[in-house]
Image (cartoon, grey):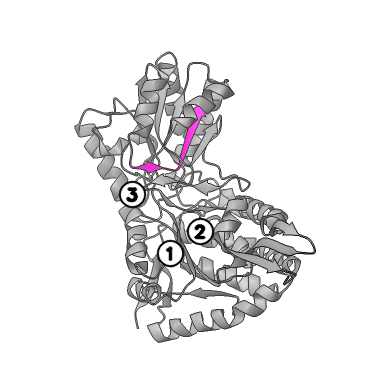
Amino acid sequence: MSMIKCISPVNGEVYAERPALPLEMAKQVVAHARQAQKAWARRPLDERVNLVLAGVARLNEMVDEVVPELAWQMGRPVRYGGEFKGFNERSNYVASIAAGALQPILVEDNDRFGRRIEREPHGVVFVIAPWNYPYMTAINTVAPALMAGNTVIIKHASQTILVGERMVRAFVEAGVPADVFQNVFLDHETTAALIAAKSFDFINFTGSVEGGRSIERAAAGTFTGLGLELGGKDPGYVMEDADLDAAVDTLMDGATFNSGQCCCGIERIYVHESLYDAFVEKSVAWVSNYKLGNPLDPETTLGPMAHKRFAATVREQIADALAKGAKALVDPKLFPQDDGGAYLAPQVLVDVDHSMAFMREETFGPAVGIMKVKSDSQAIELMNDCQYGLTVSLWTKDADRASRIGRDLETGTVFMNRADYLDPALCWTGVKETGRGGSLSVIGFQNLTRPKSYHLKKVTA
């Protein structure tokens, strides 16, 4: 029996491990979920919603266990307190719109005809969740899927192996039936076999582009619905009328928080030439104030990356950029804790261009490149010169200008004067190799259900 292991970035040792389910046992989990789904869907909507919210509340009660577990598993400093703010915000919002989002569309209702479109749950939803924000990314699908009447099976990344287990424990303790929400530990081969066998009615995957391609290959010919949130290389554009200090504070936080391991983190910044020098100077000072160290130390503000191989990718991209003429402005002597492994110092690069992988490929670490631009048209061209498209952060006092620029950008979300945030009232979606589908908002409920039309002729004459 193969074991799935979490190697802690804190000390490089095995923190937790679980046996991977054999295929036949995994099929039994799916069978239990399918058997439980109809009865779950027949429960009143408000009952399902309240049980999900009870599960959320129960997980909040586990804060003293959850926060250090996250530090051990993926390196986020305990001072930041886990992911409860966003986790709760998303859960509460989808609960507040569930009735309206799932309400039938009434076309006609009189003594001759009843015509309407209802939303019906897909059935069994499979959530494959990532390690970087393991609770918040999972709840994006888990909460609305359960509220809509689906049963859910969750498989978490090996780096955060305990998260799915803890979520299910909290929800079941709060009253969600055990077969309605289940956690599994699966290797890649068993996962692919289940998908190819059409075990699930909808699959949501958050992870790498190659991971998304693997899911699509496994699902080929099954017609299973897919939601894929994949890579990102999100840009910021600072215009000449921007609030400089606010832009520096938000964009540098967006580039480095969580050690830069965020799908919508800022990885490249284009600054109007009139503000460029000041922006760079303030950004380097901002980043240089981090304290890199053990995430279990409450004084630590920047923890290790989740795995040394992720940090190796960042180092390789930086080295390639430097070899091609880029300059690194953050003094490495400020970060003696950088050990060449998972502990990685933050960095700001200038004299960068799009011949460098650092400015076009996903970095997913605490490093950002800054380029000078002369015009909106130049900034738009550079922001679109990328295979990904999740979010863009525009900095200006002119909302009309931001909207005009936004229409020319190949992205899922346009932010103005903010970054690195998921608004649960808006659809979280991407274009190009960032993926397909969308979560949260009313549209998220639509993607987790299917339409069923009713055409009821009430007279025969």
x and y percentages locating residue 433 in the rendered image:
36, 48
Examine the rendering and report whether any part of residue 288 can be seen: no
Q: Earlier in the sequence, mark 1 or mark 2?
A: 2
At label 1, counting other C-alpha atoms closer than 10 Å, the crowd grade (few under 14, some 14-19, many 20 or more) is many
Q: Which residue is mark 3?
A: 311
Query: Is 426 located above or below residue 209 in the figure?
Result: above
Q: Secondary structure at mark 1?
A: loop
Q: Are marks 1 and 3 in contact (CB under 8 Å)?
A: no
Q: Which residue is mark 2?
A: 134
Q: Earlier in the sequence, mark 1 or mark 3?
A: 1
Q: Earlier in the sequence, mark 2 or mark 3?
A: 2
Horizontal side of residue 60 vs 187, given as left or right: right
Query: Is 351 located above or below residue 27 in the figure?
Result: above
The amino acid at mark 3 is: Ala
Q: Residue at x 42, y 22 (%)?
A: 271
**How far, Cα to Cα, is label 1 from label 2?**
8 Å
**Which segment did they paint magenta?**
387-396
What label sits on residue 255 in the rendered view?
none
